[in-house]
Image (cartoon, helix red, strand yellow):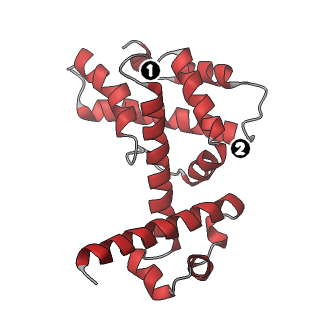
Amino acid sequence: MNEETHNKKWQITHRKIQEIVFHLLKEHPIKEISVSQVCKKANINRSTFYDHFEDIYELFDVTQLNKRKELFESFIKQSNPRDKFNFYDLQSLTQFLTFIKENGWIYSIVLKSRQDFPITEGFEELYKVLINPLKKKRPELTDNELAYYFIAFQSSFTFILKRWSDNDYQEKEKEKEIAAILINSMPLILKNK
């Protein structure tokens, strides 16, 4: 088998393992998913699994990172940010929340695992949308100060979404009301950009 064929097979298996754990996460928390269970569903042996991932937690991290990045990129393309989308207005945030609600079970998995800030992986576009314009307008702010504003925004945004997710997106507040809450919770410096 030549190297190119081997690499393609490795990539296919890698994606297959991730898809399996992703679907298992719909029904089970990560602590209930075993390497054996994944291997059985993927029709691979344990050594093949370990060629791809150190353990089930690394598999989970890689899988949710890839899915979150894929969804965010999909949303950014769909929203055409250069023309009409920004995170500072009610319409854009409502559009984003509708997207999250439509992909609710995915975000529920991601939000349950969120424990640290800043969220760096998969959110380069969000940083560009929020911080780069502020950096141009307020060049006296250091990168460290901007990071704190970004963390403040992410923290409130994430935990508001987590509460909404924990209530299965069924709170009486609809997307527009949640968007207004998000805007009101933004650091003042972001609102005044």
Q: Is residue 113 above or below residue 16?
A: above
Query: Measuring 39% from the left and 48% from the top, which residue is drawn there?
Result: 121
Query: Measuring 59% from the left and 45% from the top, which residue is drawn there?
Result: 107
Which image quadrant is residue 139 in? top left
Residue 171 placed where, x, y %? 77, 31
Which image quadrant is residue 133 in? top left
Which image quadrant is residue 31 in? bottom right
Relative side of 105 to 95, left or right:
right
> CA–CA distance between discs 2 and 1?
27 Å
Residue 175 placed where, x, y %? 66, 25
Query: Measuring 60% from the left and 49% from the top, which residue is drawn there?
Result: 106
Q: Nearer the viewer, residue 192 or 35?
A: 35
Q: Which kind of residue does numbered mark 1 sit on?
A: Phe
Q: Which kind of residue does numbered mark 2 sit on?
A: Asp
Residue 140 placed where, x, y %? 20, 20
Q: Quadrant of the C terminus?
A: top left
Label 2 vs label 1, nearer the camera = 1
Secondary element under disc 1, as helix, strand or loop, is loop
The residue tagged 2 is 166
Q: Is residue 152 visible?
A: no
Relative side of 55 to 104, left or right:
left
Relative side of 20 to 186, left or right:
right
Query: Measuring 40% from the left and 75% from the top, which residue is drawn there?
Result: 52
- Badge 2 local density, few (<14 within 10 Å), some, or many (20+)? some
The residue tagged 1 is 85
Q: Is residue 138 above or below residue 75?
A: above
